[in-house]
Image (cartoon, helix red, strand yellow):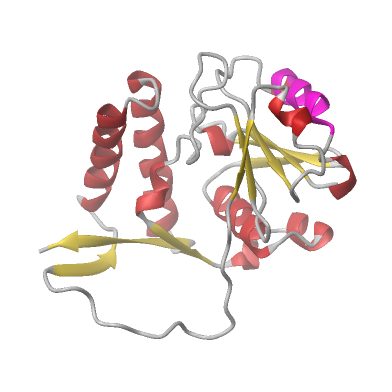
Amino acid sequence: MVHGTPLFVDGGITPRDDVGSAAGDPSRGAVPVTSAGAFGSVAAMRDLPPGWETDLCVLRHAGSVTEERGDHLLIRTPHNPDFHWGNFVFVTDANAVNAARRWVETFEAAFPQATWVAIGLIRMPDDTNSWIEQALDLELDEVLTTRSLPRQTALPEGYTVHRLVGADWEQYAARAVAENARSGEHDPESYGRFARRQAKARRELSERGAGAFFGAFAS
């Protein structure tokens, strides 16, 4: 995954690399808001694109661990081992993004129990064939940034938006599990564990004031 010119690298839906474009992450139904002040030295030291800086900031606030490895980072989320984009390799050296086999081997050595491959790249590789040869898909994810408050518009009739609180979190996890059951995208058992743990971590993050997640609700 690259932010700025973002890129998801994942393995599609196969027994070995069962990662979809959302990488097993139901958070796409909620909007996170967090302060980067407590992010630490990783982003400042590497001058990461804003999207990556935000993602890593949210992960760190929620309990993930970042390990410096020179030209890449290892991101681990011990409390949620089924979280694909919480347990991944992030290639931070723009000159190393073409070495697909090396990064797949790095991921497999770091996460030997993983049934997926999740590798983030700082930019789109010049040689996409090297990734295709590893049976991996390249996905570009655009990230929008602004220095001013977005224009406010009225909500469609019958909808409200509010910060997730209380029973909203149970609904958040339940809807993610139900959608996965409908699509059949991920293994139901491991996805259910992931969704519940993700909701718990984000609820704790929100309740201690380190971030906030919002949802749209039909009246």
Magenta residues span 99-109
Determine the residue positioned at 19% across, 73% down: 156
Say above or below: 138 vs 46. above
The secondary structure that dominates the magenta segment is helix
Picture coordinates of residue 111, whole percent (x, y): 66, 21
Q: Position of residue 211 (x, y in %)?
A: 46, 62
Position of the C terminus by quadrant: bottom left
Horizontal relation, residue 38 to residue 26: left or right: right
The residue that appears at 56% across and 31% down in the rendered structure is 78
Residue 78 or 151: which is nearer the viewer? 151
Judging depth in this view, the residue of 51 and 95 nearest the camera is 95
Q: Is residue 24 left or right of residue 132?
A: left
Residue 100 placement: quadrant? top right
Magenta span includes 101:
yes
The number of numbered badges drawn on the structure is: 0
**Quadrant for the N terminus in the image:** top right
Residue 80 colored in magenta in the image: no
What residue lies at 79% left-to-right and 62% top-to-bottom?
47
Q: Quadrant of residue 159?
A: bottom left
Give the percent coordinates (x, y) of residue 124. 74, 48
The percent position of residue 36, horizontal first and vertical second, equals: 61, 65
Measured along the vertical axis of the image, is residue 160 above or below residue 169? below
Residue 145: quadrant of the picture: bottom right
